[in-house]
Image: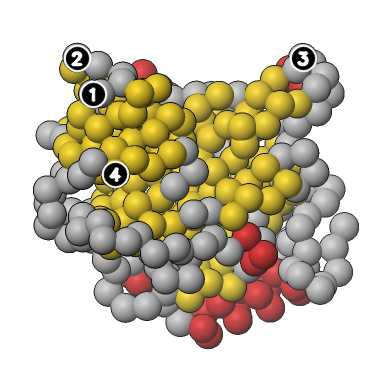
Amino acid sequence: MSWMPDLEPACPDAGALDDIELLIVPRARDIGGFEVRRALPAPKRQMVGPFIFFDQMGPAEFIHGGGIDVRPHPHIGLATLTYLFRGAFQHRDSLGSDQMIHPGAVNWMVAGNGVTHSERTDAATRAAPHTLFGIQTWVALPEAQEDAPGSFEHHGADALPVLEAEGKQLRLIAGRGWGARAPVTVHSDLFYADAVLAPGARLPLPRDHEDRGLYVTEGSVLIAGDEFPAGRMMVFRPGDEITVTAGEQGARFVALGGETLNGPRYIMWNFVASSRERLEAAREAWKAGDFEHGRFRLPPGDDAEFVPYPGGPGR
């Protein structure tokens, strides 16, 4: 996904909830029949661990012939992590990757010093009415990885650890937690999981990660007796024991967190970096539009158009 600055979320007072450091309410926006809700970055919280951007995509219903068309756009200094609950779309990037993603699988694209990618609904999916619902997040890279070459990994649903107990199922998408480790090649200590709980089921969050957060996608959860509906992100105090209980209709949520990075991170459009100079260099390289010899290339098979830098020329 691409950066849209007018999606800044709200951070209402969480009240007297001792376990919750911050409550974030994403702001929704319809972008041509496709709703996006952004939880990170928020006015009072830029990151949770290394997670610096968090978008809920949909749920959106598309008629025959409809779908998403996110034109090629660049990234630096981050890894994009894409995970779907329902639907499918096609990822292409300047590394030559051409990969469909389906529910339960993960696409992990490390931008490093510069990768361009697109996301579009494929022809087979457009041939019938369909739903799209998922999360895309950006994971800021450690400074040592910011100038590294880009890379791409896809792991199918059957390759990710699934932990099951009475009334609950947890799929570990990336990082480590609950005694398991996902196969995604991460560059900092983190966890990212999709949890589904039956009504009243309980799940503790790992205590050994510096930052921890939770985003409710369906149903509701109770934290220390207080109930939170879908579309809320809670950021918890470090070290506290947190147990999540599903509400009367059950719950689905994404749990995330990890170690904080050494030093600040800056965001400019679709770029993340530890210095403003890196951002400015990437901006000028993209605006130059030299996709044959410059820093950025366009994805093979999807090079007829691109997202221009805001205010700049495009096609």
Cβ atoms at labels 1 and 2 below 8 Å apart: yes
- Is any part of residue 60 visible from this angle? yes
Q: Nearer the viewer, residue 12 or 244?
A: 12
The label on residue 236 is none
Dot 2 amino acid type: Glu
Determine which residue is flagged by label 2: 166
Instruction: First in sequence, mark 4 or 3: give its number.
Output: 3
Question: Label 3 amino acid?
Answer: Ala
Q: Closer to the camera: disc 4 or disc 3?
A: 4
Q: Alpha-carbon distance for marks 1 and 2?
A: 8 Å
Is residue 181 visible from the viewing direction of this image? no
> Residue at label 4?
226
Quadrant of the rendered image containing residue 182: top left
Category of crowding for the residue at label 1, using alpha-carbon neighbours closer than 10 angstroms: few (below 14), some (14–19), many (at least 20): some
Residue 203 horizontal/vertical position (percent) = 20, 32
The mark closer to the camera, 4 or 1, is 4
Quadrant where the C terminus sits is bottom right
The Cα atoms of the two marked residues, 4 and 2, are separated by 23 Å
Question: What percent of the width, then of the height, locates residue 37?
Answer: 58, 49
Disc 1 to disc 3: CB gap under 8 Å: no
Question: Does dot 4 land on a helix, a strand or a loop?
Answer: strand
Would you name the residue on which mark 3 appears? 128
Q: Is residue 3 above or below residue 304?
A: below
Q: Nearer the viewer, mark 1 or mark 3?
A: 1
Q: In the rendered view, does 11 fall on the left or right side of 34? A: left
At mark 3, the secondary structure is: loop
| Residue drawn at x 71%, y 26% as measured from the top left | 61
Q: Nearer the viewer, mark 4 or mark 2?
A: 4
Q: Earlier in the sequence, mark 3 or mark 2?
A: 3
- The label on residue 201 is 1
